[in-house]
Image (tube, grey):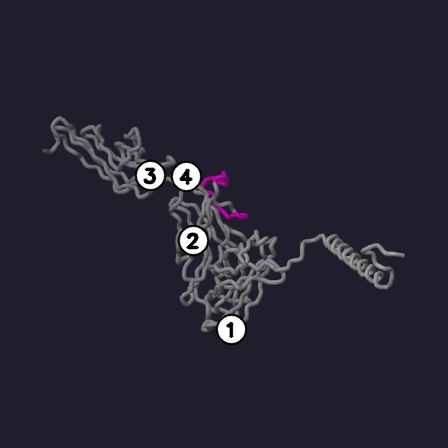
């Protein structure tokens, strides 16, 4: 039989070539099926070939408040290869202690806190992370005056974390225990705060061999938000329950070396919240306690001013057509909420008398143009505050105008 051009003659060579083609086709088919099976059998996130590594934190800062160390820093947003982070990274905080004279770390840094990504928002304040590391007696007792050194790493992948942040270090000392019995009283002169000096620290009594006595007390105050101003009885004060809503955070308004303080810079009708912190002065370092218990006070304008002082009466003789009169004056009141004064006259000491002015006198002076010659008068003056409270009468002062025939030249 003759073969057409291009045909293979039957035999072992042609069968071998056909089998090779069949095996190649089968291999490609199996490879495609395997790829399809793998893609269908792993429906989760794609396998990370190169883990994201956040840039290192560069603005870590540390500050002691009470027996807490407050750490603040900015969370990175980019990776070391200048790509945006796909998700919020976890935070790892490390700490170690160095002796006072050490120039390098004497103890290794240990991981003390891990914040998972889902919890990071709870530590965010004004675009910065704020973390509180509370020091207990086991931390402070062997490390009084040592430097607590902190560093922070972030982690966006289980495979690799960021490089260490800058190191933030501070010498730590035990703070006084918080004052537990701060009290507030409303008086005419302002709000009076009183408390008992604390006697202990977390590592022992104060004063002791290594712990100085309290150097001073810092007074903090804030005003409550307007919607929380209470409709309480006048001059109300007491302890604060819960966390009050404040217009602004507590701010330091003064200092005292004694366990009492008088706040004179107040406005009636407003509610103020107070806290007091004790201050221990170590060698070159001052350590404040945590806040005392909070107290509130709402001063009301129910207290009358003090009586005017130094009332005097001077006779002014007649001049030409002007009749003689009695000129009254007294010391200006030192109180800041005085609206004006009243003047009273009587012809007998010890009686209330008649008010001579129809409207409040804005200055501590008055001219009695209606004094009758030959009559002896007794005068008193009172002060009135902006709430309408009138003071007691001043000490009396007397004066008279002689009758025309008896008047001396």
How much space separates mark 1 and mark 2, taking CA atoms? 38 Å
How much space separates mark 1 and mark 4, taking CA atoms? 63 Å
Which residue is rendered at x = 86% and y = 56% of the image?
3
Label 3: few (<14), some (14–19) or many (≥20) C-alpha neighbours in 10 Å? many
Please name the predominant secondary structure of the magenta segment in the image. Answer: loop
Mark closest to the chain's N terminus, 3 or 4: 4
Label 2: few (<14), some (14–19) or many (≥20) C-alpha neighbours in 10 Å? many
- Name the residue tied to disc 4: 302
Mark closest to the chain's N terminus, 1 or 4: 1
- Does dot 3 land on a helix, a strand or a loop? strand
State how many labels appear.
4
Give whichever of 187, 175 is nearer the camera.
175
Stretch in magenta: 226-243
- Name the residue tied to disc 3: 338
Give the mark toward the camera: 1 or 2: 1
Give the mark toward the camera: 3 or 4: 3
- Name the residue tied to disc 2: 219
């Amino acid at each position: 039989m003759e073969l057409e051009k291009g045909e293979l003659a039957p035999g072992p060579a042609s069968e071998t070539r056909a089998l090779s083609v069949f095996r190649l086709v089968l291999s490609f088919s199996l490879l495609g099926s395997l790829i399809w099976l793998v893609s269908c059998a792993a429906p989760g996130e794609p396998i990370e070939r190169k883990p994201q590594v956040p840039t290192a934190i560069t603005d870590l800062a540390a500050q002691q408040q009470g027996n807490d160390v407050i750490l603040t820093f900015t969370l990175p947003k980019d990776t070391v290869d200048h790509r945006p982070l796909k998700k919020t990274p976890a935070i790892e905080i490390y700490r170690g202690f160095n002796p006072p004279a050490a120039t390098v770390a004497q103890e290794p840094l240990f991981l003390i806190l891990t914040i998972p990504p889902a919890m990071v928002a709870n530590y965010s304040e004004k675009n910065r992370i704020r973390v509180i590391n509370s020091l207990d007696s086991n931390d402070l007792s062997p490390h009084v005056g040592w430097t607590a050194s902190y560093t922070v790493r972030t982690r966006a992948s289980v495979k690799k974390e960021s490089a260490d942040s800058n190191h933030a270090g501070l010498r730590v000392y035990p703070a006084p225990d918080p004052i537990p019995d701060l009290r507030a009283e409303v008086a005419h002169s302002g709000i009076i705060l009183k408390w008992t000096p604390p006697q202990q620290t977390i590592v022992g009594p104060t004063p002791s061999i290594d712990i100085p006595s309290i150097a001073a007390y810092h007074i903090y105050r804030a005003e409550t938000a307007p919607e929380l101003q209470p409709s309480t009885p006048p001059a109300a004060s007491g302890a604060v329950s819960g966390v009050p809503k404040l217009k602004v955070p507590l701010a330091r308004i003064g200092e005292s070396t004694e366990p009492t303080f008088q706040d004179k810079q107040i406005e009636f009708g407003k509610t103020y919240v107070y806290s007091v912190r004790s201050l221990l002065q170590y060698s070159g370092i001052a350590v404040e306690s945590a806040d005392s218990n909070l107290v509130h006070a709402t001063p009301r304008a129910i207290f009358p001013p003090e009586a005017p002082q130094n009332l005097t009466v001077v006779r002014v003789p007649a001049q030409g057509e002007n009749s003689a009169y009695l000129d009254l004056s007294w010391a200006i009141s030192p109180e800041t909420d005085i609206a004006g004064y009243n003047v009273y006259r009587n012809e007998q000491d010890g009686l209330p008398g008649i008010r001579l002015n129809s409207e409040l006198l804005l200055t501590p002076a008055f001219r009695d143009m209606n004094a009758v010659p030959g009559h002896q008068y007794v005068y008193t003056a009172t002060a009135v505050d902006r709430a309408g409270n009138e003071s007691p009468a001043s000490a009396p002062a007397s004066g008279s105008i002689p009758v025309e025939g008896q008047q001396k030249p």
